[in-house]
């Protein structure tokens, strides 16, 4: 990818409905340069722009990062973890562990049962669990939703489902399908985003021939974490940061174009007082990324 494409992708990852004109202004180029690049990526299936609902609205209140050390056929194990309803991200990794998964479930009892199931899989040697105390940055999980301000109805759910398929669907097209005016659709969608109920962003198609390097990080900070968080948020390839309870203070994922970018980031982290990188792992083969959820749980509460 050239510089304009990379920068456009980074901006759309954080705001999937950003106009090509706005992106062009930020990159000091013209709309045509942005539109032809992003349009080609969408048409080829290299990227998707979709909406995701905050897990809290679905009653999924326990979010966990799970690392698995194993022996034997890692592919077979990863398939079994992928089949779990609670797994939204599963990756084969290079490093001390062989698999990393992210699980979303309703309560701690469900987490206990899911971890017990993973430990029962043939070849699994060790399972370590870290609980997300709070997600600080992520495509699929933004700020905690303002639950008291939400009063979702069937039209809101229909809009969300349309945006789960195409996050850049026009207000006119949505209005025709849900029976609202353009301004009515815009108002509802802005409310969903502003309250944290929904987030729209760009997903890149993960392939084994990509030049991207996707690294996971576990950090232990013995002092204020604000400088570390600021450094993380400044990374163009940032995918998520979570404040965690367990082995690390923070867990994050960053995509780099090359090892030079990775090394530069690690060097900057090591300069921060009271912060050390406890662990790094390369996502060698991402097996599952699921950000779209059935809305039946919300429907049950409003029916």
Image (cartoon, grey):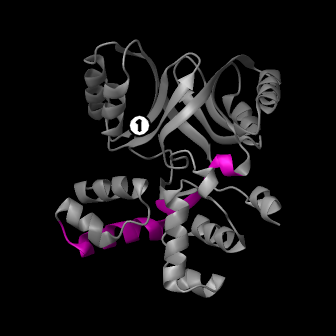
Say if residue 291 shows up in the picture. no
- Residue 50 position, x and y percent, is 54, 62
Looking at the rendered image, the quarter that the C terminus falls into is bottom right
- SS under mark 1: strand
Tell me where residue 255 sits by quadrant.
top left
Tell me where residue 272 sits by quadrant.
top left
Q: Residues within 10 Å of mark 1 (few under 14, many from 20)?
A: many
- Residue lying at 71% horizontally and 22% vertically, measured from the top left: 72
- Residue lying at 41% horizontally and 65% vertically, measured from the top left: 41
Please state which of residues 174 and 73 is positioned toward the viewer in this rendering: 174
Please state if 169 lies on the left or on the right of 292 as rendered.
left
- Residue 24 position, x and y percent, is 24, 67
Mark 1 lies on residue: 254
Q: Is residue 65 above or below residue 19?
A: above
Please state which of residues 1 and 223 is positioned toward the viewer in this rendering: 223
Q: Furthest-front residue in view? A: 148
- Residue 171 position, x and y percent, is 50, 80
- Residue lying at 63% horizontally and 59% vertically, measured from the top left: 150
**Residue extent of the magenta highlight:** 29-57
Please state which of residues 16 and 127 is positioned toward the viewer in this rendering: 16
Q: Furthest-left residue in view? A: 28
Please state if 67 lies on the left or on the right of 275 as rendered.
right
- Residue 83 position, x and y percent, is 76, 42
Say if residue 194 shows up in the picture. yes
Number of marks drawn: 1
Q: Is residue 17 above or below residue 72?
A: below
Q: Is residue 38 magenta?
A: yes
Q: Is residue 112 above or below residue 164?
A: above
Looking at the rendered image, the quarter that the N terminus falls into is bottom left
């Amino acid at each position: 990818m050239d510089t304009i494409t990379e920068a456009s992708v980074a901006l759309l990852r954080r705001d999937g409905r950003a106009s090509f004109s706005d992106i062009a202004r930020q990159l000091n180029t013209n709309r045509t340069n942005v539109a032809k690049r992003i349009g080609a990526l969408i048409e080829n299936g290299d990227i998707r722009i979709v909406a995701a609902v905050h897990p809290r609205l679905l009653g999924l209140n326990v979010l966990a990062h799970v690392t698995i050390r194993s022996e034997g056929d890692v592919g077979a194990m990863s398939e079994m973890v992928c089949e779990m309803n609670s797994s939204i991200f599963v990756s084969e990794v290079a490093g001390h562990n062989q698999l990393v998964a992210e699980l979303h479930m309703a309560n701690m009892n469900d987490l206990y049962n899911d971890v017990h199931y993973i430990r029962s899989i043939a070849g699994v040697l060790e399972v370590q669990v870290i609980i997300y105390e709070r997600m600080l940055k992520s495509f699929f999980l933004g700020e905690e939703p303002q639950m008291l301000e939400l009063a979702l109805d069937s039209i809101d759910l229909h809009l969300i489902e349309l945006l789960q398929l195409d996050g850049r669907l026009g207000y006119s097209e949505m209005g025709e399908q849900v029976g609202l005016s353009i301004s009515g659709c815009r108002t509802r969608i802005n409310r969903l985003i502003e309250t944290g109920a929904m987030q729209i962003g760009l997903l890149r198609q993960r392939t084994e021939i990509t030049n991207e390097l996707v690294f996971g990080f576990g950090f232990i900070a013995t002092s204020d974490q604000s400088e570390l968080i600021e450094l993380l948020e400044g990374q163009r390839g940032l995918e998520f940061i979570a404040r965690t309870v367990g082995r690390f203070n923070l867990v994050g994922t960053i995509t780099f174009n090359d090892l030079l970018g990775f090394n530069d980031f690690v060097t900057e982290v090591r300069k921060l007082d009271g912060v050390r990188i406890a662990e790094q792992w390369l996502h060698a083969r991402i097996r599952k990324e699921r950000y779209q959820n059935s809305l039946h749980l919300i429907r049950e509460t409003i029916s």
